[in-house]
Every structure is written in C-alpha cells, then in structure tokens.
Image (cartoon, rainbow, N blue to C red):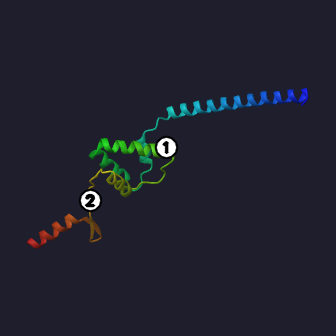
Amino acid sequence: MNDEDKELEILKARRLAEMQKNISMQEKQKEIKQLKTLQKTQYNPRDLVIKKLGYRGIEVLQNAESQFPNDVQIVVKRLGELITSGEFNEILDGGKLLELFRSLGINVRMQNKINVEQDGKFVSITDKFKQKSESSDD
C-alpha cells in the first residue's frame, strides 16, 4: 500500500467519523424535540379513552366513575397508556367497556329500562303494568 492510499483511507475514516457524529447529533436533537412536544401535550388519559368510546360508552364510564372512582381511574390511566403507545386502537362501545370492567372485578351497575310499544308510542314497561293493574282493579 502506498502513501496516497494510506492518506485516502485516513481521509475516508475522518469523513466517516464526522458523518456519524452529525447523525448522532441530529438524532439527539430529534429526541429532545420529541420530549418537548410530549411535555407540551401532556395528555389526559380520560380524554383519550373518551375519544375511543362508541355507543353508550360514556354512560358506562360515568356510572363506573361514580361507583368505583379509584379503580376506574387506574383502568382509564392504563387504557390511556395503551392508546398512546398504539397497542389499543379499537372503538369501545358501552357493552365492551362494561365487559372490561366486570372482567377486572369492577361490577358496574347500570340502570335498565325496558320500553314497549303502545298505541304507536314507546312506554316504559312499569307504566304499562301500572295501567293494566289499574284497569283490572276497576
């Protein structure tokens, strides 16, 4: 190997080291920028979960929060983490959310109401029974 080849190899090595240094500096700056962005957008786990709720999901969540505030806060925080990381991205309707809570031992009670059709209108079944019992008493 002659002197020119050695000098060329040394120059290549210097240039490669310089390029690697620049790349690592850019990556560090990118990481710092991402951290700052994350700090600015301090996410609220509850808001993230609410965005993923479907039909009657908010109703189930509110019932759960009023009945089991501490337990639900932990579940919502974990769901928020899963949503943020991208591990969870499906829509939770009320039934799925209720099933999730119950599988975790949080037995959320929901108010049930059954409506029946009477004369083209929907009437609660309790009103329907009251009307029948009143008419049979006569």
Question: Any mark on residue 112, and which?
Answer: 2
Which residue is identified by label 1? 84
| Residue at screen point 13% across, 71% down | 135
Q: Residues within 10 Å of mark 2 (few under 14, many from 20)?
A: few
Quadrant for residue 5, please give it. top right
Q: Position of residue 108 (x, y in %)?
A: 28, 52
Q: Quadrant of residue 111?
A: bottom left
Residue type at the position of mark 1: Thr
In the picture, measured across the screen, residue 87 lies left or right of residue 20, that is left
Label 1 crowd bin: few (<14), some (14–19), many (20+), radius 10 Å: some
Q: Is residue 101 above or below residue 35?
A: below
Is 110 displayed left or right of 30 in the figure? left
Nearest the viewer among 63 and 7 is 7
* C-alpha gap between disc 1 and disc 2: 33 Å
Q: Relative to residue 74, is residue 19 depicted above or below? A: above
| Mark closest to the chain's N terminus, 1 or 2 | 1
Q: How many marks?
A: 2
- Of 12 and 101, which appears nearest the observer? 12
Closer to the eye: label 1 or 2: 1
Is residue 46 visible to the viewer in this orientation of the structure?
no
Q: Residue 28 location, x and y as percent?
A: 62, 30
Rendered-image quadrant of the N terminus: top right
Q: Secondary structure at mark 1?
A: helix
Q: Is residue 127 above or below residue 33?
A: below
Q: Residue at x 54, y 32 (%)?
A: 35
Q: Quadrant of residue 68?
A: top left
Q: Which amino acid, mark 2?
A: Asn
